[in-house]
Image: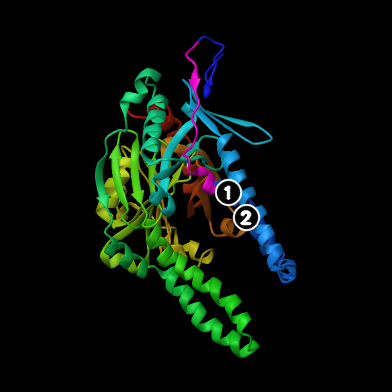
Amino acid sequence: MTAPGVQEDVTGRPPVTERRLHPVTPLRRAWAPVAVLMGWAVHDPDGAQRQLTRLTTTTLLVGLGVLIPAAALYGFLSWWYTHFAVTDSELRVRTGLLFRRTAHIRLERIQAIDVTQPLLARVAGVAKLKLDVIGTDKKDELAFLGAGEARALRAELLARAAGFAPESAHEVGEAPSRQMLRVPPGVLAVSLLLTGATWVWLLVAAVALPLLWMATHSLWTVLAAGVPMLGAAGASSVGRFVAEYDWTLGESPDGLRIDHGLLDRAHETVPPGRVQTVRLVEPLLWRRRGWVRVELDVAGSSNSLLLPVAPRAMAESVVARVLPGVTVPPREAFSRPPRGARWCVPVWWRGHGLAVTDAVFASRRGLLRRSLSLVPHAKVQSVRLAQGPWQRAHGVADVHVDTGANGTVTARLRPAEEAAALLHSQAERSRTGRRDALPDRWMV
């Protein structure tokens, strides 16, 4: 016989202790039945309106008297039948009321563990643990845990994934972090005001909505068109400010740590060695200030932003930490496409460029919004040459390099002979880079 919450191990190893989520979790899960009703109302608004008009006060009270206890019972039972446990080799999560489901998450397949706190979770002192696991499209999560317990569990999982013995993993604790950069709120606000997306949506709304009113004289039509436009403008300005507020980047043995958020606070980790591509994005209105945005493609992770805005020199120093041994090629190192490329891509052909160093494949594109993509040779999975009939007529071709994050970086409009030579030389660089690359390790 084993005690409650303890799972017996037939191999003779010490029993595994199962744990439950935080007691406030039922409040989150109790919304599921209510969400089903709201989804039905949104899907069939006419039917929902007809049903509401038929309701009497007595029927409404009886319905609430049934719905609220049912939702509370569902939330409690779903919490009661959810357990998790950490074994020597995996994180085991058991869920389900009627149909039981057990997820076995191998520790060596965990790429990153993020701790997030939505606004209400911060008030309640709880947090959500999100795990990036190789082979999954979305993050597995444990929601909710006590804020301290979430950080301790994250440290334990990373320690075990790094190879620490189970009996000492509890003592390792969270790896120390050194702050590298903090984006001031004022700088973030100015950078968003200088981003073209917000002003483009506002300009479209200012032109389209009056024309739509003159054509239809329907307020509902104008609102149906205007709300998405204004929402897009708000998402690209206010929404990003709220999400990227107090962006702090730190360095630790388990990767680069990112903390951000005004309402919902997130604590993310960029795992070492898993970054496939780094992009330096430079909008037109940022250039006089020397600002860039740093984006990422990470294998097995959905984290895609490293710095929302930073001086270019600082951004390049951070890139050197993300991609050891890689330096950003200077502007004069990039070769432009030949003049014949203007017949394939008028005007914008001047924005493309290519630089290949001993460590990195660098491709540049864009005139108004410049983007520089850096791919270490060791991260290139395949190389392809593409040449359409119009490109053949003008003697140019595109070279695509594919990475482990299902991403592609393209060197556009290269001279045909250069592209053919680049295809073979890049394949050889990639083989050499993978052979000489250091293994991806946690907490090295």
Q: Position of residue 296 (x, y in %)?
A: 42, 47
The part of the image, by quadrant, that contains residue 223 is bottom right
| 304 on left or right of 191 | right
Q: Position of residue 99 (x, y in %)?
A: 68, 34
**Residue under the point 34% across and 69% down:** 285
The part of the image, by quadrant, that contains residue 46 is bottom right
**Residue under the point 67% across and 53% down:** 66
Element marked by disc 1: loop
Relative depth, front residue between 388 and 222: 222
Please name the amino acid that badge 2 sits on: Val
19 in the magenta segment: yes
Contact, CB < 8 Å: mark 2 with mark 1?
Answer: yes
Relative depth, front residue between 91 and 268: 91
**Label for residue 34?**
2
Mark 2–mark 1 distance (CA, rounded to whole Å)? 8 Å
346 in the magenta segment: no
Q: Main secondary structure of the magenta part?
A: loop
Q: Which residues are magenta?
A: 13-28
Q: Position of residue 38 (x, y in %)?
A: 64, 60
**Residue under the point 39% across and 51% down:** 123
Q: Which residue is mark 1?
A: 30
